[in-house]
Amino acid sequence: MIKNMQAILDLMDRPSTGSGPGEYYLDTLAVLPEYRRRGIGRALLEDGIKRGIAAGYDLITLVVDSNMPDLIRLYESVGFQKAEHRWIFRVDFLRMTYSVKRQNAKL
């Protein structure tokens, strides 16, 4: 499983055309249902944040289906904030942002 996790993290580390200038965009974060509620999603998310910070980004972003409150709570629990809604393929997605400066100010 660790080998597969590394492959996912490597894919997350690519620049995305969906992000704006100066943003590190976390794309396609997923955990198979049988492995959920074990901290894997949080670990992937935290590693993605660390990679964005190490790459020198001040803003880390993602989008989540607005009908997935458990995921939204997970993202909020590590410091993401709700930004705006985006309609993509007729689905209401919520764009969320993690400000490195805002999080450092809390420390």
Image (spheres, rainbow, N blue to C red):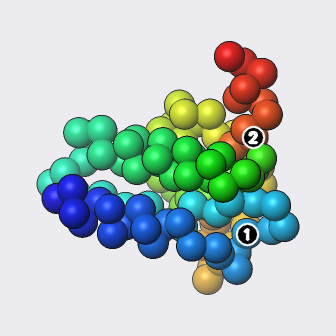
When the figure is inspected, residue 6 is found, relative to residue 97, above or below; the finding is: below
Callout 2 secondary element: strand
Callout 1 secondary element: loop
When the figure is inspected, residue 102 is found, relative to residue 40, above or below; the finding is: above
Residue 26 % position (x, y)? 57, 61
Q: Residues within 10 Å of mark 2 (few under 14, many from 20)?
A: some
Locate the C terminus by quadrant: top right
Count of all numbered marks drawn on residues in the image: 2
Tell me if 95 is positioned left or right of 101 in this view: left
**In the image, what residue type sits under mark 2?**
Ser
Residue 89 % position (x, y)? 61, 83
C-alpha distance separating marks 1 and 2: 14 Å
Q: Which residue is mark 1?
A: 19
Q: Residue at x 77, y 47 (%)?
A: 58
Residue 84 visible, this orientation: yes
Q: Residues within 10 Å of mark 1 (few under 14, many from 20)?
A: some
Locate the N terminus by quadrant: bottom left
In front here: 105 or 51? 51
**In the image, what residue type sits under mark 1?**
Ser
Residue 95 visible, this orientation: no
Task: Using the image, tell me which numbered label, if any, was put on residue 99.
Answer: 2
